[in-house]
Image: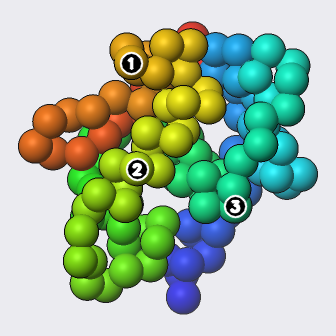
């Protein structure tokens, strides 16, 4: 139980996050880019929050499937790749050259907030 309580407290630390021209308000489930609303699914928000809470850490696709999707056995990691691609399309300045959601080939992903405020 202690682990779950600690995790819950840590998650509550990032109700509002800023990186680049992005503001994410997880309490309101709203994301803005350049002040304009970005339409996101609940799963995209959950993945974004996970990345923000684990910034600068390398995260395997398998770890994302377990922690974000809740899979104990996973048929494919393409699910993660597709969701990260959607985050890039919606939040990156240039999705073809990701600045925030970086791929570490053969390993997974890493969220790099850059100059977060």
What is the quadrant of the C terminus in the image?
A: top right
In the rendered view, does 56 fall on the left or right side of 39?
left
Q: Is residue 15 left or right of residue 105?
A: right
Q: Residue at x 29, y 58 (%)?
A: 78
Find residue 60 and name its label: none
Total count of labels = 3
Residue behind mark 3: 42
Instruction: Say what secondary structure mark 2 lies in.
Output: helix
Badge 3 marks a residue whose secondary structure is helix
Q: Earlier in the sequence, mark 1 or mark 3?
A: 3
Instruction: Reply above or below: 48 against 35.
Output: below
Q: How is the image coloured?
A: rainbow
Residue 70 lies, in percent from the top left, at 44, 78
Discs 3/2, front: 2
| Residue pointed to by mark 1 | 96
- Earlier-in-chain disc, 2 versus 1: 2
Q: CA distance from mark 3 to mark 2?
A: 15 Å
Image coords of residue 58 (percent x, y): 28, 41
């Amino acid at each position: 139980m202690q682990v779950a309580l600690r995790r819950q407290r840590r998650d509550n630390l990032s109700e509002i996050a800023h990186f680049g021209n992005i503001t994410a308000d997880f309490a309101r489930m709203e994301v803005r880019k350049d002040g304009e609303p970005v339409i996101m699914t609940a799963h995209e928000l959950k993945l974004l929050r996970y990345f923000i809470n684990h910034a600068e850490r390398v995260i395997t696709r398998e770890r994302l499937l377990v922690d974000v999707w809740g899979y104990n056995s996973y048929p494919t990691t393409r699910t993660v790749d597709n969701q990260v691609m959607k985050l890039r399309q919606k939040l990156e300045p240039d999705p073809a050259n990701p600045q925030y959601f970086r791929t570490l080939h053969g390993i997974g992903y890493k969220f790099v907030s850059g100059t977060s405020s």
